[in-house]
Image: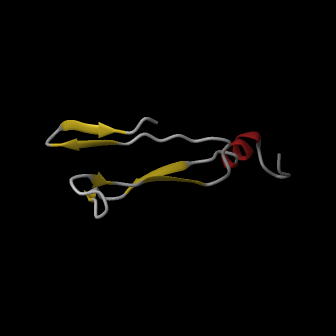
Amino acid sequence: MEAGRSGSDAAASAVIRCEGQVQRPHNSTHVPGTVNVVVTASCTGPVPEITTRAALYKNGRLVSQSAR
């Protein structure tokens, strides 16, 4: 705990926040007839492991999803 900080302040500063970002899906330029999309995550501190899963919908219907 840092000097001069209460327990709750120290605990709040130890929280790591992660945010996911999804690029806009687009037609693949290297595999005709497919769609590419990239999903990334960035965190405010190091984490031992993080997983993401992406799903692609067209007109409200699931087309494909990643394994993780």
Of 9 and 30, the residue lying toward us: 30
Residue 63, horizontal then vertical, whole percent: 23, 39
Q: Please tell me which residue is depicted at 25% across the width and 52% down the height of the picture.
A: 34
Judge by depth and name the residue closer to the eye, 36 or 24. 36
Query: Left or right: where does residue 21 sit relative to residue 26?
Result: right
Furthest residue toward right: 3
At x 65% / y 45%, what residue is drawn?
15
Give 24 or 34, whichever is nearer the viewer: 34
Q: Residue furthest left?
A: 59
31 in relation to 65, above or below: below
In the rendered image, residue 3, in percent from the top left (x then y), is placed at 86, 52
Question: In x, y percent, where is residue 9?
Answer: 70, 46
User: Is 49 displayed left or right of 62 in the figure?
Assistant: right
Most distant residue in the bottom direction: 29
Which residue corresponds to the image point at 27% horizontal and 53% vertical from the top-left?
35
- Indicate the quadrant containing the N terminus: top left, top right, bottom left or bottom right: top right
Rendered location of residue 8, percent (x, y): 70, 40
Relative placement, left or right, of 31 versus 48 is left
Q: Is 68 placed above or below 25 here?
A: above
Q: Residue furthest front?
A: 31
Q: How is the image coloured?
A: secondary structure
Query: Looking at the rendering, which quadrant does residue 49 occupy?
Result: top right
Direction from residue 13 to residue 21 in the image, left or right: left
Quadrant of the rendered image containing residue 21: bottom left
Tell me where residue 62 sits by quadrant: top left
Q: How many marks?
A: 0
